């Protein structure tokens, strides 16, 4: 497993570059052009959140029920919350909001090309990713102060807006239903949709 480590304390620190924050109008116009696939997509990036803002971006990992993404902060910070084991975010929306900043800044574990909306992936839905089977949990994944500081108040406002909330633009939580190896470029296949 080859991994790349990225420190986020460089020029703009772990809070990102405020000069890259987009206005509501810019985000809305960009969002209108996005059309993620619904049935199957691809894994664009794997991120493991380390201490002190450090991020590892391995090409592949073995997802497990015990660890989620190996070495990730979830195991250190909230192992008693299995419904918050792995964060998944849309790559297209991430690139829009990051506006040139690295996608690792979000801190989400799996950056994917897939529609994560409530309509497409209700809680209980199962996704085959490489050798692992993942289950969408009911745990809400909402933006926080870090998200606001990194990408701006307008980005946070849009993810929480009634017209966009069901799109889950901030992402979703999944847990490992069946362990397995996953690699960047692997296909994500929706195998069942929850109730």
Image: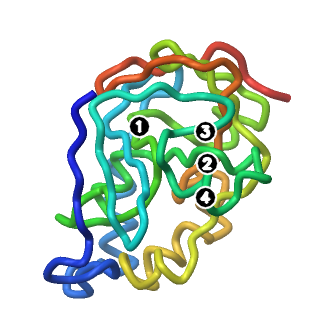
Q: Earlier in the sequence, mark 2 or mark 3?
A: 3
Q: State the image coordinates of residue 146 (x, y, percent, origin top left).
A: 48, 79
Task: Give the labeled residue for mark 2.
Answer: 172
Check the image and report above or below for 154 versus 160: below
Q: Is residue 98 left or right of residue 81?
A: left
Check the image and report above or below for 53 versus 78: below
Q: Earlier in the sequence, mark 4 or mark 2?
A: 4
Q: Earlier in the sequence, mark 3 or mark 1?
A: 3
Q: Quadrant of the C terminus?
A: top right
Q: Earlier in the sequence, mark 2 or mark 1?
A: 1
Viewer-nearest of labels 3 and 1? Answer: 3
Determine the CA span between mark 3 and mark 1: 20 Å
Mark 2 crowd level (few <14, some 14–19, many ≥20, 10 Å Cα): many
Task: Give the labeled residue for mark 3.
Answer: 67
Task: Give the labeled residue for mark 4.
Answer: 76
Determine the CA span between mark 2 and mark 1: 11 Å
Tell me where residue 94 sits by quadrant: bottom left
Label 1 residue SS: strand
| Residue drawn at x 36%, y 78% as measured from the top left | 150
Mark 4 crowd level (few <14, some 14–19, many ≥20, 10 Å Cα): few
Tell me where residue 132 sits by quadrant: top right
Determine the CA span between mark 4 and mark 1: 24 Å
Q: Residue furthest right?
A: 195
Label 2 residue SS: strand
Task: Give the labeled residue for mark 1.
Answer: 112
Mark 1 crowd level (few <14, some 14–19, many ≥20, 10 Å Cα): many
Viewer-nearest of labels 2 and 3? Answer: 3
């Amino acid at each position: 497993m080859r991994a790349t480590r990225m420190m986020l304390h460089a020029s703009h620190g772990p809070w990102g570059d405020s000069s890259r924050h987009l206005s509501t109008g810019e985000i809305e116009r960009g969002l209108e052009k996005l059309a993620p696939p619904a049935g199957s997509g691809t894994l664009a990036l794997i991120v493991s959140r380390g201490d002190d803002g450090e991020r590892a971006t391995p090409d592949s990992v073995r997802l497990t029920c015990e660890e989620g993404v190996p070495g990730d902060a979830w195991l250190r910070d909230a192992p008693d919350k299995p419904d918050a084991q792995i964060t998944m975010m849309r790559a297209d929306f991430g690139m829009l909001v990051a506006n040139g900043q690295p996608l690792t800044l979000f801190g989400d574990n799996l950056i994917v090309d897939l529609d994560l909306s409530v309509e497409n992936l209700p809680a209980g839905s199962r996704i085959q990713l490489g050798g692992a089977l993942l289950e969408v949990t009911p745990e809400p994944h909402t933006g926080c102060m870090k998200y606001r500081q990194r990408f701006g108040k307008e980005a946070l406002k849009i993810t929480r807006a009634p017209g966009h909330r069901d799109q889950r633009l901030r992402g979703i939580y999944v847990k490992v239903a069946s362990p397995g190896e996953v690699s960047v470029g692997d296909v994500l296949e929706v195998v069942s949709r929850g109730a």
